[in-house]
Image (tube, rainbow, N blue to C red):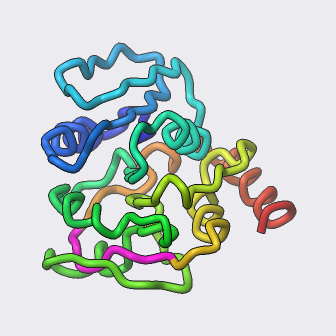
Amino acid sequence: MPTMWQGREGIETIRALNEIKSVGEIIVIDNTPDEIHLEDFKKVVHIREGKNTYVNPAWNKGYRLAKFDKLLFVNDDVETDWSFVDKLEEYITEDRGMIGAGVTCWQGPHRSGGVAPIKNRPNCYGCVFAIHKNSYVEIPEDLKVHYGDDWLFNKSGKQNYEITHWKMSGESEQTSGRAEFNPIKEEDKRLWFSKYQ
C-alpha cells in the first residue's frame, strides 16, 4: 500500500488486514517524511521513503520486497469489508493475470462477492487488485501515477478478472487528485500514448 496518509482509511485498512488470516505481511510504502508509527501492527513492513516516490514505483517496490507469491495492492483511500481477502486468495494463481475491483463493487450492494473474467479494464480497477507474483510485469519507472494498472492488465498475457458484488467505497484520488500532481499525470499520459500503449 503506497500512502501519503491523506485520509483515515489508510490506518483502518492496515488494522483490518493485520487481523486477516490469509494476509502474511503488509508492505506499506510511506511516501512522506512524517513520523507515523506502525509498530503495533505485527504484519507491517514499514518502508519509510521520506519523500514521494509515487504510486507505480511503490507498486514495483512492494512486488520486489514481497515474501509471498499472492499479492494484493490497495489504495489507502478505499473502504470495504476486507474479509473478502480470505475468499480472494484461492483465485490468485499463476495462470491468471490481474483480479481488480469491478464496476459492481462501486455500484452494487454488498453481496457474497466473486470473480469473473473480463476483456477490458474498468474504471477504478487498480484501486484494489490482486495478482500472482509470477504474473506481475514491472511497470516502467517513468510512469509515476497513472497507467500502472493498464500496464499490468495488458502485459501479463493472461486472462484478467474482476471482483464482483463486493461493496467498496472511498474518495478516489485523495492524494493524486491534488493540483500539484497534474503535470505528472500529464507526463504519464504523454508517455503512455507515445511509448507504452
Residue displayed at 38% across by 59% down: 128
116 versus 66 height, above or below:
below
Relative side of 155 to 158, left or right: right
Q: Measured from the top left, where is residue 34 in percent x and y? A: 40, 17
* Residue 161: in magenta span: yes
On the image, the x and y values in percent for residue 15 come to 17, 37
User: Residue farthest to the top?
Assistant: 35
Question: Residue 130 lies in what quarter of the image?
Answer: bottom left
Q: Magenta includes 57?
A: no
Residue 138 vertical position relative to residue 24 in the rendered view, above or below: below
Point 77% across, 69% down: residue: 197
Q: Nearer the viewer, residue 46 or 178?
A: 46
Q: Which of the two residues, 65 or 119, is positioned nearer the viewer here? A: 65
- Front-most of residues 175 and 158: 158
Number of marks drawn: 0
Extent of the magenta region? 160-167
Residue 181 at x, y percent in the picture:
61, 43
Q: Residue at x 45, y 60 (%)?
A: 131
